[in-house]
Image: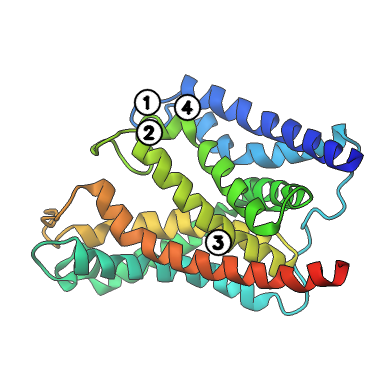
């Protein structure tokens, strides 16, 4: 009981240190459209989870053992490869679903993304390089969410529950930006609550994927890399599929909010579910052994 209380106090301290600066900066420098007017705020928001981990570990005298700071167990290379391939696959599967179920008229081959093959390859490569270059931001979040919060929650609850709770906390951490249209815009019913619900769903399934990568390697770096590549590859390469080669937008069967839900969420949910099942299977032998 004493250890659980200590763990809970560490979690509370970590969350306060993670949430407070982000909410202060997020509301103070919001442009009211889901972005920030301050370059400093924009460049530092993703680093606060890591800063919170460092301060929490020092203040509570926990130290830095079990911090997932190594580059991985033996044979971790394939998981680094998956961390790179998943965001690319997510982008193009989402583009295919967009044209199968959302675009009214026109073919995927008519899109701006495929109108110039050389440009499409160049954009993809540039977004991958950008993801690698900004991986420190992904590290800032993943050292916090997957490297600290999830393992701490696992001391209080089963792994699947810890993954879900982390996902919800991670989603709500984006609150100041979501309140003004971050990721999902403003043109949908029940704004901004629909955006909060969508972000929670997305983060819960991504939490499963990134936790699986972290556990399989014993390192936060694959998750950090995957995180940043999702941000750069998906955001750079998906939207050109919604636009014709001449710059006009395709006519859609729904608004952009539901366009994202229908196109992007299916693969996130499917892969996240698979990773959650794998995490559950990994947990069962351990629980039997301890019994």
Residue 119 appears in the rendering? no
Left or right, 121 with respect to 115, comes to right
Disc 1 is placed on an element classified as loop
Q: Establish if 285 lies above or below 246.
A: below
> For mark 4, does the 10 Å Cα neighbourhood hold few (<14), some (14 to 19), or many (20 or more) residues?
some
Residue 160 drawn at (x, y percent): 63, 58
Q: Nearer the viewer, mark 3 or mark 4?
A: 3
> For mark 2, does the 10 Å Cα neighbourhood hold few (<14), some (14 to 19), or many (20 or more) residues?
some
- The image quarter containing residue 35 is top left
Calculate the distance from the C-alpha at mark 3 to the C-alpha at mark 1.
Answer: 28 Å
The number of callouts visible is 4
Q: Residue at x 31, y 53 (%)?
A: 260
Residue 184 drawn at (x, y percent): 33, 43
Residue 291 drawn at (x, y percent): 86, 67
**In this figure, which residue is indicated by the disc labeled 1?**
31
Q: Please report whichever mark, 3 or 2, sits nearer to the chain's N-terminal start.
A: 2
Q: Nearer the viewer, mark 2 or mark 4?
A: 2
- The image quarter containing residue 103 is bottom left
**In this figure, which residue is indicated by the disc labeled 2?**
34
Q: In the rendered structure, are the residues bearing label 1 and label 4 in contact, judged by CB atoms less than 8 Å apart?
A: no
Disc 3 is placed on an element classified as helix
Colouring mode (rainbow / by chain / secondary structure / one colour) = rainbow
Calculate the distance from the C-alpha at mark 3 to the C-alpha at mark 2.
Answer: 23 Å
Q: Please report whichever mark, 3 or 4, sits nearer to the chain's N-terminal start.
A: 4
């Amino acid at each position: 009981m004493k250890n659980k209380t200590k763990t809970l106090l560490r979690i509370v301290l970590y969350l306060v240190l993670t949430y407070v600066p982000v909410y202060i900066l997020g509301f103070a420098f919001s442009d009211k459209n889901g972005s920030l007017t301050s370059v400093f705020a924009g460049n530092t928001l993703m680093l606060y989870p890591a800063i919170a981990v460092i301060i929490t570990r020092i203040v509570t005298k926990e130290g830095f053992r079990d911090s997932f700071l190594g580059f991985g167990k033996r044979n971790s290379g394939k998981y680094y490869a998956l961390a790179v391939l998943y965001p690319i696959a997510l982008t193009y599967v989402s583009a295919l679903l967009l044209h199968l179920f959302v675009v009214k008229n026109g073919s995927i081959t008519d899109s701006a993304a495929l109108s110039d093959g050389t440009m499409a390859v160049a954009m993809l490569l540039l977004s991958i390089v950008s993801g690698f270059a900004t991986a420190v931001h992904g590290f800032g979040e993943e050292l916090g969410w997957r490297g600290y919060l999830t393992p701490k929650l696992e001391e209080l609850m089963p792994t699947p529950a810890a993954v879900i709770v982390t996902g919800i906390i991670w989603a709500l951490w984006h609150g100041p930006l979501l309140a003004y249209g971050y990721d999902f815009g403003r043109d949908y019913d029940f704004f901004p609550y629909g955006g909060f619900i969508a972000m929670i769903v997305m983060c819960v399934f991504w939490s499963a994927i990134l936790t699986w990568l972290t556990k399989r390697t014993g390192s936060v770096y694959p998750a950090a890399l995957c995180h940043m590549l999702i941000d750069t590859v998906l955001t750079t390469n998906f939207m050109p599929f919604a636009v014709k080669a001449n710059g006009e937008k395709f006519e859609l069967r729904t608004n952009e909010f539901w366009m994202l839900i229908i196109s992007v969420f299916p693969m996130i949910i499917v892969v996240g579910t698979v990773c959650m099942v794998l995490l559950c299977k990994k947990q069962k032998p351990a629980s039997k052994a301890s019994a």
